[in-house]
Amino acid sequence: MQPKVIISGGGTGGHIFPALAIANKIKSAHPNAKILFVGAIGKMEMTKIPEHGYEIIGLNIAGIQRKLTVKNLFVPSKLIGSLLKARKIIKEINPDIVIGVGGYASGPLLKATSWNKTPYILQEQNSYPGITNKLLAKKASKICVAYPNMNRFFESSKIVFTGNPIRANILSKTNKKEAIKHFKLDESKKTILIIGGSLGARTINNSIEKFLENNTNNNVQLIWQTGSYYFNDLKQKHESNPNVHITAFIKEMNLAYSAADLVISRSGALSVSELCAVNKAVIFIPSPNVSEDHQTKNAMALVNKDAALLISDKDAPEKLSDVIKNTINNTDLLNKLETNISQLAKLDATDKIYEQVKNVAKW
């Protein structure tokens, strides 16, 4: 028997990396498995998935823009076209199971899956699900979640608390001294890691610039992932600073985490799960540009357990510098945050999700 699986979704690394973790687990258990990804044309999954050796088909789908724009006029026709294409994909592949990880493409693909009476599983990464997953949940066989109390949104009998799958290389432990050396920094100084996402985060970058202007303490250094949008400008301004390692994107995240004494990050689901897994003290600055303000809800799940600090996006430019200064030199606070966040880690999430896939697909 050759297992056949379709994994649908994407849009951000927060959807793509868990999807790849699930695919890799299936492939390791069933080397002959046929695994197809379905994503959205123009989104990052269309390049990231093939880089990892998997086939992907794109749907011409887009979400409704919150502001009035001509683009919204094309959403209905794109949706109909995507549903028809998705239905064709399902009929041609005839998968044993479909896995939805969130993102534009998962909506039409899983709708077509339900028409075909093919079972599907949802993997909900956030503490507050989006509209698409709420609608798709009605016909899902199982819903794998990363936060407790999700029965507010989903049928209790379908929920399986698995945690979020994370990239395997994240857990590759590296000696802190070696990690600091990799980034050409000074092992005697406190190190702050700034990660605003692959594209970057304007507020975080602006707030870090203010911190650098106001910080006269030469005992602090930065590993600063600016994001591709902001890299060239910020590099010109700060690359001469010996206390700053500046980069558009960090490939060696395990080294970056190993080097860091404190992390400043958005609170997308993947970032939160990774930071729990690597036991790092973190200041979250949730993105305000997400549906249902779910990044704040993700972060608050940790803040309420004294496992992280939070500054709102609008307050960050004025408050971040002081919070950094009050945290980075407070060993007791750093230790408390590291201890508490480590207790929230779910290191076997991928295995748990695979067990649900196997059971539903009846392999």
Image (cartoon, rainbow, N blue to C red):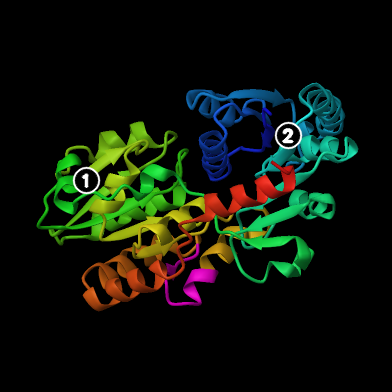
- In the rendered image, residue 311 lying in the magenta stretch gets the answer yes
Quarter of the figure with residue 96: top right
Which range is magenta?
A: 301-312
Tag 1: residue type? Val
Q: Is residue 202 visible?
A: yes
- Describe residue 52's horizontal placement relative to residue 147 as left or right: left
Q: Which residue is mark 1?
A: 244
Q: Please tell me which of labels 1 and 2 falls first in the chain.
A: 2
Which residue is disc 2 drawn over?
A: 62
Q: Is residue 153 above or below residue 291?
A: below
**Res. 243 in view:** no
3D distance between C-alphas at marks 1 and 2 = 38 Å
User: On the picture, is 46 further left or further right than 193?
Assistant: right
Please name the residue shown 79% across and 43% down the image. 119
**What residue do we see at 23% from left, 52% from top?**
259
Question: Above or below — where is 228 with respect to 361?
Answer: above
Q: Nearer the viewer, residue 204 or 295?
A: 295
- Please state which of residues 314 and 304 is positioned toward the viewer in this rendering: 304
- The question of residue 142 being in magenta is answered with no
* Residue 22, quarter of the rendered image: top right
Badge 2 marks a residue whose secondary structure is: loop
- The label nearer to you, 1 versus 2, is 2
Picture coordinates of residue 8 (x, y %)? 68, 36
Residue 19 is marked as: none
Determine whether label 1 and label 2 are within 8 Å by CB.
no
Residue at (58, 59) in percent of width and height: 162
Mark 2: which amino acid?
Answer: Ala
SS for callout 1? strand
Viewport quadrant of the C terminus: top right
